[in-house]
Structure formats: structure tokens, C-alpha cells
Image (cartoon, grey):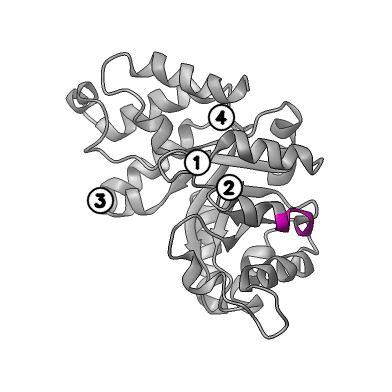
Amino acid sequence: MTALEKLNNKLKAGLHICVGLDTDISKIPEYFKKEPNPVLAFNKTVIENTKDYTAAYKINFAFYEKDGIEGIKNLIETIKLIPDDLLIIADAKRGDIGNTSRMYAESVFNYFNCDAVTLHPYMGFDSLQPFFEFENKLNFILALTSNPGSADFEKLELKDGRLLYNAVIEKANQWNTRNNIGLVFGATNSSELRKAIDSFGDMPVLLPGVGAQGGSYDEIVSIFGNAGKSNFIVNVSRGLLYCDSTDRFPETLRERILSYVNL
């Protein structure tokens, strides 16, 4: 089964949440810190209580890489905990000259065995081509991100009147000859989303920024619904991971993710 087929199976079931496993040990409930491996115990609890209600998991590599070899071990063990029918996105934001990108692609797809990766496109096609050659995987290209600094470059106006992120979306469509490219579009950019949504085509769209960053899940669902599209997943990280600091965390977590599913 390809990564896209895996994702589409969940979308057809009406599941559009992507759980972000950006685990910060300083923010997890205190009772996990009594475990031999607090991060892995916490991640296991999150996965066990969300796996039936999510379409994907997005793992931000930085939260694990910072701890060196022990963090990499936690990353590997966390990936093993995720059921095979759920998309695993490596939020690694790769993109470099060809030979370097080939090594990054082999790391993410062959060593860590992730289904998808996030990529930045600003070094052009040859910097991303090694990822595209993995036909059964998915590559989410950064178009318009959710952070305030996205305006510094991504919203710059080009000579032809398009904004830079519009040009990125157009290129992604052109590059998608293997049907294994998606887009990252920040959920905080709802007005831009309404204008750009028809340019996405059938490419899957990953929308970070709901919750702590200010994006609205209800609004995203409405925008895609009004456009007659369902090819989207909305990432929620802090809004789920740190929803309860007590030993009721598992119950509160299930209640929180079900509130998205039952909209």
C-alpha cells in the first residue's frame, strides 16, 4: 500500500486529524516522569488513546534529535508503536543539493521507515527530486506556513503579480508526476486558503497551526467542505499533548480528539 492510499483510506472514513508528536518532557504530566523512559511512556499513551480517531502522526525530529542518541532511540521506538495503517510523517523540513537530499531521503524513508516527509522547496527541483523518486511515499512541500515570519518571504509578490507561495503550489503541481506530492499550508492563513484552495488540485494538504498558534479546525473543515474537497489533514500538537496535566490525561486526551472527530 502506498502512503497516499494509506492516507486516503482514513480520509474516506472521515478522519482528518494529524496528531503531532512534538513531545517536550518539561510539559508532560508529572506522573510520566516516574517512568524509566518518560518520553516513550508518554508517546505510547498518546498513540493508544488517539490511534482510532486520527489519520496520521507527525513527528517533529528536532524534539528527539536534541537528546542525541537517546532521543534517536526514542524516535525509532515511537515509530514502532504507530499502527501500520496510519500515515507517519517525518517533520524534518529537508531540502538540499541532490547528493545530500538523497542521503536525507534514504534516512527518512529507509532507515526510519516513515511514510512521508516535509520539504522546503527554495533550492528548486533538483534538491527535492531524490525524495520524489520514492514513488510509494508522500512529500509535503512547504507552501505557506503558519508562523508570523511566513510573510518575510512566502508572501512576497513576484513580477507577474503572483505571491511566492502561489508559485510554489504551481511548481508542486508540475512536479507531481508520480502522484506523491502534497502541500503544507498553515491553518492560520484562512483567507489565503480560500483563495488558493482550487490550485491544490488533488494533492493532499497538511495544515499545521490549529490550537496554540490560533488556527481554527472548524474553519478549515468549512473551507474545504465549501470547495467540495476532503483531501486535507489538520495537525494538532500542543492542543492534544498538553490538554491535561493530571493523571486523567488519557481520558481528557480521548475526549479532546473525539471533539474533532464528532464535529
Q: Kindly report which numbered mark, 2 or 4, lies closer to the viewer in this rendering.
A: 2
* Mark carried by residue 220: none
Q: Residue at x 73, y 26 (%)?
A: 13
Eyeballing the image, is 12 above or below 130? above
Mark 2 vs mark 4, CA separation in Å: 22 Å
Q: Which amino acid lies under the numbered mark 2 shown in the image of this protein?
A: Leu
Q: From the viewer's perspective, tell me whether residue 76 is left or right of residue 261.
A: left
Helix, strand or loop at mark 1: loop
Eyeballing the image, is 261 above or below 183? above
From the image, tell me which residue sits under label 4. 83
From the image, tell me which residue sits under label 1. 210
Residue 17 can be seen, yes or no: no
From the image, tell me which residue sits under label 2. 207
Helix, strand or loop at mark 4: loop
Mark 3 vs mark 4, CA separation in Å: 25 Å
Query: Where in the figure is residue 139, as x and y percent of width and height?
Result: 63, 57
